[in-house]
Image (cartoon, rainbow, N blue to C red):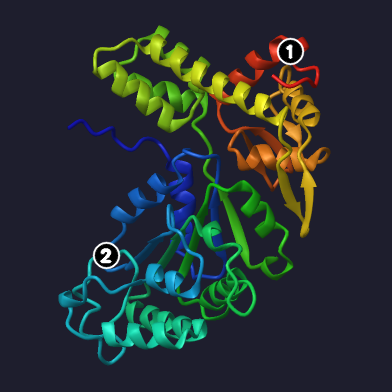
Amino acid sequence: MRRIEFHNREQETKEIMDILDSEPSLITFVYGPINSGKTELITNLIKNLPKSQKVFYINLRGRLISNYDEFIRVLFDVEHEARYERIKEFLKPVVNVLPESYSGIPIPKDLFLKLFKEKEVEDAFVYIETVLRAFYKNDQNPVLVIDELQVIGDLKIDGFLIYKLFNFFIRLTKELHLAHVFVISSDSLFIERVYSEAMLEGRCRYLLVDDFDRETTTAFLEKNGFTDGEKSLAWEYCGGKPVCLVELINRKFGGRNVKEKCEDALNIRVSQLRDLLDLLGYVKPQVMLENEKYAVEREHVVGILKDFVDRDIVNFEGHRPEKQFMINKNILFLDPKNGKVRPQSKLNLLAIREVMRDAQNWDGSAG
C-alpha cells in the first residue's frame, strides 16, 4: 500500500517544538480550516519526540458525548490494564514501560469504576494531575493533547464542563507548569468563542495550521511526479488543501485523469451548494447567538455568497446568523484572530462563484 509522506510543516513544527522546549505556561489552541492537516501535524510530531517524553492523546472526533459517563469513558483508558497490572505509588511501576504516546489517561479498573460511580469530575482531574506528575522526568514535561474539544462544548455537569476543563488546563500550564496542553479544533466558531473568553486572556496562544501556500503545494506535487500542467491544474481547483491534493496524487498513481477528478470534485460542490440554496427557499433554519434564536434568511445567504464573486475574504460582521450558518455547514471558515471569513477551500470558492455567476437565478424565489 502506498503511503504519501508527511510534507513540509517546518514552520508549525518549529513553533510547537519551541513550546515543548520551554516551561509550560500557556494552553495552545491549534486551529484551521477542515482537512488542513492539524491532526496529521500533531501525530507526526508525537512520533518524533524523545521516547522519554510521554504524550497522552485523546481524540473526541466522532464521539457522541452527552453526559458525564460518556465523557469519563473517553477520557480514560481502561482497555490495556493488563499491560501494567496495577498503578501503585503514583504510577512508578509503569512510567518506564508505557509507550511514548498513549491513547487516554491510564487508570486501573477499580479506580476507574470508583470515579465512574461517584460522578465527581474534580476527582477525575485530581487523578489526571497525579498521573502527569508521575510522568514528569528529566525536565521533560508530559504532553496532553485533546483533539476536537468542541464536541463537549455544550455539555453541562453542574455548569458547562468546558469551563471546568479550561480551569484545569490553566492549572496544569500557567499555575503548576506541569504539562503542555494542546487543544485541536477544526470548528472555527468554537475557536471564536474561546478567543473571546475573558478567563483565557493571557493564558493561551493560538496556532493556525492553514492549507499549503502555492510554493509548498508545487513542491509537494512535484515530489509525487506531477507535471507542470498538472501542478497548475491542482492549484486552480484545490489550492493547498492537503486532503484534496492527496486525492489527486492517488488518482494519478492509479492511472486516472487528474483533470477529470478536479472537475468531478467541483461539480459535487456546485450541486451541494445549489441544493442548499434551493432548500433555503422552503425552510428557515435557526442559529443561536447569545442564547437567542435567529432565523437564517435565504436572501442574506445569497448576498454573502455574491460577496465572494470578486473577493476571497470578507468581514465577519453583518448578517451574522447567515455567516454562522454557513460556517457550521463547513462552507465558510472564520479566523477569529482577524475577524475574517473565507471559503473553507478553493473548491468551495469556485463552487460559490459558479453558482452565483447567473445572478438572476437567485432572486428570492424557491427552486
Q: Position of residue 3 (x, y in %)?
A: 24, 34
**Identity of the residue drawn at 47% across and 84% down:** 119
| Res 48 seen here | no
Quadrant assignment, res 307: top right
279 over 155 or under it: above or below: above
Q: Which mark is residue 265?
A: none
Q: Which mark is residue 100?
A: 2
**Identity of the residue drawn at 45% across and 70% down:** 71
Q: Please name the amino acid that badge 2 sits on.
A: Glu
**Identity of the residue drawn at 62% across and 80% down:** 158
228 over 4 or under it: above or below: above
Tag 1 residue: 361
Q: Residue furthest top?
A: 229
Is 281 left or right of 134, judged from the image as shown?
right
Q: Nearer the viewer, residue 183 or 77?
A: 77
Residues tagged 2 and 1 counted as in contact (Cβ below 8 A)? no
Q: Secondary structure at mark 2?
A: loop
Image quarter where the C terminus lies is top right
Q: Please name the amino acid that badge 1 sits on.
A: Asn
Q: Position of residue 140 (x, y in %)?
A: 37, 71
Q: Position of residue 108 (x, y in %)?
A: 27, 83
What crowding class fits label 2: few (fewer than 14 Cα within 10 Å), some (14-19), or many (20 or more)? some
Image quarter where the N terminus lies is top left
**Identity of the residue drawn at 43% across and 40% down:** 9
Q: Residue furthest front?
A: 282
Q: Residue furthest bottom?
A: 89
Q: Nearer the viewer, residue 159 or 99?
A: 159
Q: Position of residue 349 (x, y in %)?
A: 61, 23
Quadrant assignment, res 114: bottom left
Quadrant assignment, res 321: top right
